[in-house]
Image: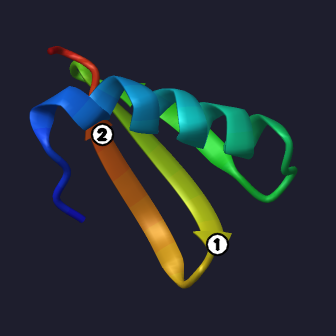
Amino acid sequence: MALPAHSFDFALVAYITFSSESTQCSTKNLEGALLIRCPFNGIKNVVLSNGF
C-alpha cells in the first residue's frame, strides 16, 4: 500500500486509533517503523514508517 509522504502521519494515527479499538490487532515498534498486524479488510500486515 503506497501512500504519499504527506499522508504517513495521518495514516499512522488512523491505524493506531483503529487498532486500539480492536482486540484482534497488535502493534510493534521495529527499528523506526511501526508494524501493525490487523485482520481487517483482508490486510494482514501494515508497515508504516514513523521516521519521517
Q: For mark 2, does the 10 Å Cα neighbourhood hold few (<14), some (14 to 19), or many (20 or more) residues?
A: some
> Can you tell which quarter of the image residue 18 is in?
top right
Q: Element under label 2?
A: strand
Q: Is residue 20 left or right of residue 46?
A: right
Count of all numbered marks drawn on residues in the image: 2
The quadrant in which the N terminus is found is: bottom left
Image coordinates of residue 33 in percent, x first then y, are 27, 28
User: Label 2: which residue?
Assistant: 48
> Which residue lies at the image location 57% right of the left edge and 37% below the top edge?
14
Q: Earlier in the sequence, mark 2 or mark 1?
A: 1
Choose between 51 and 26: the one closer to the eye: 51
Choose between 44 and 3: the one closer to the eye: 3
User: Label 1: which residue?
Assistant: 39
Q: Element under label 1?
A: strand
> Which residue lies at the image location 79% right of the left edge and 59% below the top edge?
24
**Can you tell which mark lies on residue 8?**
none
- Asked if 37 appears above or below 30 in the picture, the reply is below
Dot 1 amino acid type: Pro
Image coordinates of residue 28 in percent, x first then y, are 49, 32
Image coordinates of residue 46 in percent, x first then y, are 39, 56
Q: Residue furthest bottom?
A: 42
The Cα–Cα distance between marks 2 and 1, rounded to whole angstroms, is 16 Å
> Can you tell which quarter of the image residue 51 is in?
top left
Q: For mark 1, does the 10 Å Cα neighbourhood hold few (<14), some (14 to 19), or many (20 or more) residues?
A: few
Q: Is residue 10 left or right of residue 22?
A: left
Choose between 45 and 3: the one closer to the eye: 3
* Colour scheme of the picture: rainbow
Dot 2 amino acid type: Leu
Image coordinates of residue 2 in percent, x first then y, are 16, 59
